[in-house]
Image: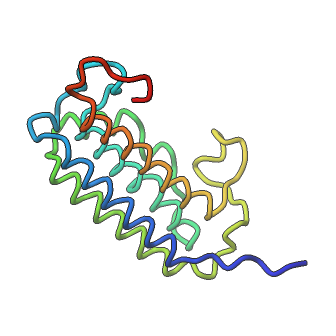
Amino acid sequence: MSAPEIVPIDWFQQRLRTSAEDFVWAAHQVPAHRHSTQPPRQSLGEWSVERHALHLVFYDEYSVIPTIGHWLGGPAASEADSTDELEDEAFAQRPSLDDLLDQFRSLREQQIELLEECATLAWDEPRETMWTPAMETPITARWILTKSLQHTAEHLHNVLALALFWDVKRPSASS
């Protein structure tokens, strides 16, 4: 049996930090007067920049950080802790984009700091999580961190589309 692959914690930390900063940069590419405005057409989605930012805050705060914390001995995370209704209620309070981005950076730093404690985890050992029912399988620590990167990239893509194609009268098929 071969030795388990050593997970480069610093690699994940760097990617998590960079992806957060990329999202913050992308959010600032959208003109300020559009931060809270729903996109003008369906091809740009339904969410404003502020809504994307709030969603990333909720994802890190109620899904990723509690899951990692649970693996380190903390209480189990529950999907009930972060419902769409709670997220909608938080968004109804209209937090500013700057506040949301500050929260996102802070939560991402918490996630990065937690990784320091994860060196002894079996990164590819499946574990029961809040995602197990939907995924119909336990997930690994590597999966949750990779999903965090994918999730940020997805919202980064959507926010950059708002910045680039909002004023385009006839969007190309590739937008």
Residue 73 versus residue 96: which sits nearer the camera? 96
Residue 131, image x, y percentages: 60, 47
Residue 46, image x, y percentages: 32, 25
Q: Residue 89's image quarter?
A: top left
Residue at the location (47% across, 53% down)?
63
Direction left: furthest residue: 33
Residue at the location (35% across, 70% down)?
109
Residue 79 versus residue 175: which sits nearer the camera? 175
Question: Which quarter of the rendering shows the N terminus?
Answer: bottom right
Q: Residue 22's image quarter?
A: bottom left
Let me know if residue 89 appears in the view.
no
Q: Is residue 132 above or below residue 17?
A: above
Left or right of 22, for residue 27: left
Q: Residue 173's image quarter?
A: top left
Left or right of 72, for residue 90: left
Direction right: furthest residue: 1
Residue 56, image x, y percentages: 36, 49
Let me know if residue 153 appears in the view.
yes
Residue 137, image x, y percentages: 72, 47
Residue 61 versus residue 6: which sits nearer the camera? 6
Q: Is residue 128 above or below residue 169?
A: below
Residue at the location (58% across, 49% down)?
130
